[in-house]
Amino acid sequence: MNCYVLMPSIGRTFMSIETEQFDLEKRQNISRIGDDNDLKSFSRTWQLEASKYNYIYNFSWLGRPIIQLPQDVFAMQELIWSIQPDLIIETGIAHGGSLIFSASMLELNAACGGPLEAEVLGVDIDIRAHNREAIEAHPLGKRISMIQGSSIAPEVIELVRARAAGKQRVMVCLDSNHTHDHVLAELEAYAPLTSVGSYCVVFDTAIEEMPAEMCSDRPWGPGNNPKTAVWEFLKTTDRFEIHQEISNKVLITVAPDGYLRRVKD
């Protein structure tokens, strides 16, 4: 009888040890990747070569184009599951794939005991009518609302702050105008809305590592981009830190130094 009573407990102990060992090996793997400069350099080269074919434009999420690297989408999935946010703020909407992705993750969270009324708020200076219609008509459109206007306009910032008031866990994603000044203004406006333990994710920091000629037709480029804004922002606060482990893990990312974790009030 005692054997039958003890076996479940022993099984749980073995499972716990096995899980802890797996997690330890995973952390060690990621740490070793972070130390492998050749592998990181190879990954950046691959990303630059793939960008010649507009690689990030070739994917969709539940029917809507999502202009992101699959590796970053996977990283965001892990974060949204672990944080269980009840509000995700996104600047930059484009075709709406990222909004649909975030909404789908919130739907899964809710189905698994997470916040039932969690929502996504998208901000864009130009929400084209056909994109708005497709987003609102999507089965996950019920979790999405949108504000049209510049993300750094005072009236838009106030609207977003009002929507964040009373929320328990807020996550922020910045992916609109990629100039230094614009992203820095976004960080100053929206990063404070990020909950402790949650993330403000700044996309397209990889522009800093791109050849200048690849940005010749854009108002941003090396020296003037989201990564330089992140570096400037972090000089002014100790409330956020770069979670380098995420970039090390995915290797191929548009957001190196862009996964900012809030560590204190």
Image (spheres, grey):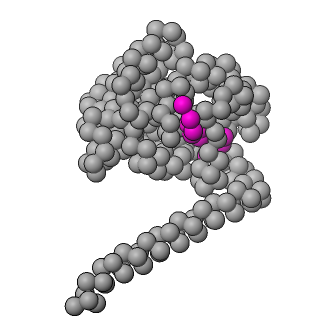
Residue 55 point in image, percent of width and height = 57, 44
Residue at image x 55%, y 19%?
Answer: 189
Residue 247 point in image, percent of width and height = 63, 49
Residue 254 point in image, percent of width and height = 61, 41
> Magenta segment, which residues?
251-265
What is the chief secondary structure element of the magenta stretch?
loop
Residue closest to the far left: 1
Residue at image x 40%, y 24%?
Answer: 164
User: Toward which corner of the image does residue 174 lie, by quadrant?
Assistant: top right
Is 261 displayed left or right of 39 in the figure?
A: left
Is 59 displayed left or right of 26 in the figure?
A: left
Q: Is 117 covered by the magenta stretch? A: no
Pick the front one: 265 or 177: 265
- Residue 69 position (above or below residue 127): below
Q: Is residue 233 visible?
A: yes
Is 226 displayed left or right of 11 in the figure?
A: right
Residue at image x 45%, y 13%?
Answer: 158
Residue 134 point in image, percent of width and height = 32, 29
- Residue 143 position (above or below residue 76): above
Q: Is 258 covered by the magenta stretch? A: yes
Pick the front one: 161 or 148: 161
Q: Count of labels shown?
A: 0
Q: Is residue 252 visible?
A: no
Q: Point out the image quarter for the N terminus.
A: bottom left
Q: Point out the image quarter for the C terminus.
A: top right
